[in-house]
């Protein structure tokens, strides 16, 4: 079913790109192109299994039922045996490819087994090897200047515990050396001031930070996430709407970013109660892959410093190499690091980094819960990180991203009525573009799936690429082939 | 260091108790009594490791650093090689004992490995075997009448997603066949009514339901959990304060429960906005192991039915056998099942059960997040459940609980100035008692630890037992010996 349509233009770019194949080392049996067993995807087995699943579990959002035993590398298998090139990867979560043999070793290790069967309440009975696991994995991967960690279970959980740290930090500053008052101790039990807090977390229009009650109050991407759910009256600020190509709109874009910074500072200055922290994604992913420049983010850092507001960077989706740096915020060259950086997806382990010990409460049982993370996930993150380092996968992703971006630029420019606003230059494989409208976007996604490429959308009419870190030129070429063909026909 | 003090009274009870030892089958090498390597616990290695851990991770609440490689069955090893009989079990979380050989097989299985290395975004790309994993494990263990499940990552997460289901359900009822209005769609993005909800979740005084922002708003056990954190203005109702022994205070206790039911109904009737659901623990664990009778819980069910309020039972700590039934709420013989039952700890997998399909939103991406649970944890829960069934561990726990309760009753009655209000008769090993004050409670816990028993507190001055499901008479006898000796000396 795969037609070999190849653009001569990006074939020329491709000749300049060279790299040894880590994927070939990991996955000698990886398919070289999508493999089809059924006329359409999802096929009959996938549909039947999904129907059965729906009898017990919410399956409204199923794309297709996947066969993870027969998925390999960058190719995900569905229940019918179709093998799709995966450029979405469990919403940006598979770092090293399906059934990576080194991760299988990690999963089969005695260290992992021990962590699984004896899951500890980490904050009461930490394991003898927990610090070492953190140091060899998550902490080794930490952003510059951040040497402390809190481990959590999901991106939402990471953000919410970071928010709690921010509130406790700001109140501790106000309180100084004093202990809790009797009024604080009793009023908090009634969910009332002054024991409960009236401080807030500020987030940005179109931002996404999770779907529990605190994180959802900062999520501003789509109504379907928020309808009917109680929310805190926390403020939001505008996020820059940049024009593309960036090189043509430098002045206008800087003005737009400056406008947003002024607006943010005005919101902070006029807030009826203290804003404890702001949270921002380096790229607003769920909200449409909206980028801003280092100028904007340095501005955020300056304003937060000036007003004693904590600066939380949500790297749940951008973190761990996809941007061509380990952490996307490293692209900004900030004059001082963020106060907290949250992470999850590609590490399959969640939590936040920080450097100021004061962000760790001084009393026990404040930042606390039964699990406080999961050593088995920290071990997995260690395994992922060590492979990333061993094979230079961040650097490889940066190079491959340049190739992918350049090729897409060429292809997309052929269809200016259909697709535009290519984003992610010099930003690894963290690439997206807009389609003329939602309907066309959805048609493109479905047509790509029919052609054996699993691709994801974001925002109202955007397509986002979220491949693994072992997505290489050969995979990119298969993808680009199919995409160009789809764009021509759709 | 272990002295053989044995009460002749409970030795007589012990003779009447007989059971084959599952523990001996699982753990032929399990210690027969605590083993000491250091003069005090935590020993020097544990202290040194904890100090190092504190450089990167919040270790304010550490009891001791545990060596999970050398823990076995009901005995937890610390970093110094001391082996303590564990009657606390990671805050009620180790179902089958440390390093259970059958769970090790589960953890090493290809099914587990596959789930670990290819962690799916379950609601988009569910695995071919996910329904089967659920059916053979979590769903097979479900409370009577509840055939649907939502999988989450922690007790807090389970409760919060249950709350979201409750809010969406109640608003869907109000909305009827209508779609979302434009005003709802825009206002929710500002965290404002009518798109955001002003409904609430009612919880009970001293209840504990987790520590994320929504769940923490329903937690009412201790100020240290809630101070400085924003909370929703949700109502709380009184929970009965029963007098012990129950047989002596039947009338007064019924009056107290009736008083609480009247008060609850009054709160519901006078609430300024709709109460979407109430949530209650079968035993308020963190809040002090506060029990109520089936009369009270049937009353809750009746009131919630009458006022169209959903009834959520939080079995995060009580669930999975410790109460002598699979689910503690089965003790109540309700006339109709709860609307949702949440679980976590002993299954090492979290989520909620429900039976009404309307509690599942009709649109995709409403009850949704990246992971939507974790197949590796569902596989672990399956492994745990199958061992529970194979060895009749719930029934065994019920019997052992009777022995333990009877023996404790005898022992505690010898020290009426020190300990009182024994709770948990006919309730498996889910047993607790009060101490004269917090100081004495803490002394008892520390003295037990020094004698090789790891024990936990709850509430202000209570001790709670949370042993495994393979805690047997031989373990109980070691514990009772030491406890009696400690109580005599403390």
Image (tube, coloured by chain):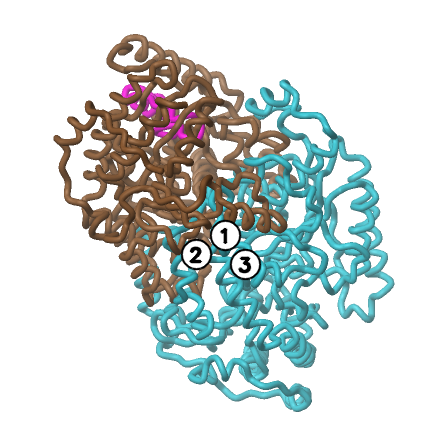
Chain colours: A cyan, B brown
Local SS, label 2: loop
- Please identify, in this view, whether the residue under mark 3 or under mark 2 is nearer the observer: 3
Q: In this view, does A418 lie to the left or right of B362?
A: right
Q: Is residue B294 left or right of residue B172?
A: left
Q: Mark 1 lies on which chain?
A: B
Residues drawn in magenta? B281-304
Q: Residue B123 has which mark?
A: 2
Task: Provide the residue designation for mark 1.
Answer: B369
Q: Are marks 1 and 2 in contact (CB under 8 Å)?
A: yes
**Label 3, label 1: how many angstroms apart (C-alpha)?**
31 Å
Local SS, label 1: loop
Query: Residue A146: x and y, percent?
Result: 69, 55
Note whether B181 is above or below B80 in the view shown: above
- Residue B286 in magenta stretch: yes
- Give the residue displayed 68% in from the left and 68% down from the top: A325
- Name the image quarter holding the C terminus of chain B: top left
Q: Residues within 10 Å of mark 3 (few under 14, many from 20)?
A: some
Closest to the observer: A349 or A448?
Answer: A349
State which quadrant residue A318 falls in: bottom right
Note whether A145 is above or below B19 in the view shown: below
Query: Residue B487: x and y, percent?
Result: 36, 23
- Is there any visible trace of residue B395 in the rendered image? yes
Q: How crowded is mark 2: few (under 14 residues within 10 Å), some or many (20 or more)?
A: many
- Give the residue displayed 28% in from the left and 22% down from the top: B411
Q: Residue A223 has which mark?
A: none
Task: Provide the residue designation for mark 3.
Answer: A132
Q: Which chain carries label 3?
A: A
Q: Which chain carries label 2?
A: B
- Residue A469 in magenta stretch: no
**Label 3, label 2: how many angstroms apart (C-alpha)?**
34 Å
State which quadrant residue B111 falls in: bottom left
- Is there any visible trace of residue A372 in the rendered image? no
């Amino acid at each position: 079913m795969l037609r070999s349509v190849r653009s001569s233009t990006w074939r020329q770019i491709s000749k300049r790109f060279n790299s040894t194949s880590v994927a070939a080392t990991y996955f000698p049996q990886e398919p070289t192109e999508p493999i089809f067993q059924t006329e359409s995807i999802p096929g009959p087995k996938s549909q039947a299994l999904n129907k059965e699943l729906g009898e017990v579990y919410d399956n409204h959002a199923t794309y297709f039922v996947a066969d993870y035993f027969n998925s390999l590398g960058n190719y995900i298998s569905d229940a019918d045996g179709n093998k799709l090139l995966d450029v979405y990867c469990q919403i940006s979560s598979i770092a090293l490819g399906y059934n990576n043999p080194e991760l299988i070793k990690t999963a089969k290790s005695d260290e992992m087994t021990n962590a699984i069967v004896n899951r500890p309440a980490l904050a009461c009975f930490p394991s003898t090897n927990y610090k070492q696991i953190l140091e060899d994995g998550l902490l080794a991967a930490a952003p510059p200047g951040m040497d402390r960690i809190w481990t959590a279970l999901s991106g939402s959980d990471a953000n919410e515990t970071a928010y709690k740290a921010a509130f406790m930090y700001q109140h501790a500053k106000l309180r100084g050396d004093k202990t809790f008052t009797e009024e604080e101790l009793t009023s908090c039990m009634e969910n009332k001031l002054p024991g409960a807090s009236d401080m807030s977390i500020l987030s940005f229009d179109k931002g996404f930070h999770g779907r529990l009650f605190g994180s959802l109050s900062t999520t501003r991407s789509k109504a379907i996430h928020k309808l009917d759910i109680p929310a805190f009256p926390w403020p939001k600020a505008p996020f820059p709407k940049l024009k593309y190509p960036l090189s043509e709109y430098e002045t206008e874009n800087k003005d737009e970013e400056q406008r947003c910074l002024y607006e943010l500072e005005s919101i902070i200055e006029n807030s009826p109660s203290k804003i404890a922290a702001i949270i921002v994604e380096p790229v607003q992913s769920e909200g449409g892959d909206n980028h801003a420049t280092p100028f904007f983010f340095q501005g955020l850092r300056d304003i937060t410093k000036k007003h004693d507001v904590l600066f939380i960077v949500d790297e749940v989706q951008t973190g761990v190499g996809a941007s061509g740096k380990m952490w996307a915020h490293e692209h900004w060259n900030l004059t001082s690091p963020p106060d907290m950086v949250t992470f999850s997806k590609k590490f399959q382990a969640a939590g936040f980094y920080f450097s100021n010990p004061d962000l760790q409460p001084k009393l026990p049982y404040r930042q606390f819960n039964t699990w406080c993370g999961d050593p088995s996930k920290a071990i997995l993150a260690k395994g992922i990180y060590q492979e990333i380092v061993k094979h230079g996968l961040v650097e490889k992703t940066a190079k491959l991203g340049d190739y992918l971006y350049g090729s897409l630029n060429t292809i997309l420019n052929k269809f200016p009525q259909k697709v535009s606003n290519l984003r992610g230059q010099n930003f690894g494989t963290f690439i997206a573009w807009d389609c003329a409208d939602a309907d066309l976007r959805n048609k493109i996604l479905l047509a790509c799936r029919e052609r054996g490429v699993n691709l994801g959308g974001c925002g109202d009419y955007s397509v986002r690429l979220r491949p693994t870190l072992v997505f290489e030129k050969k995979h990119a070429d298969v993808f680009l082939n199919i995409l160009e063909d789809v764009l021509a026909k759709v």
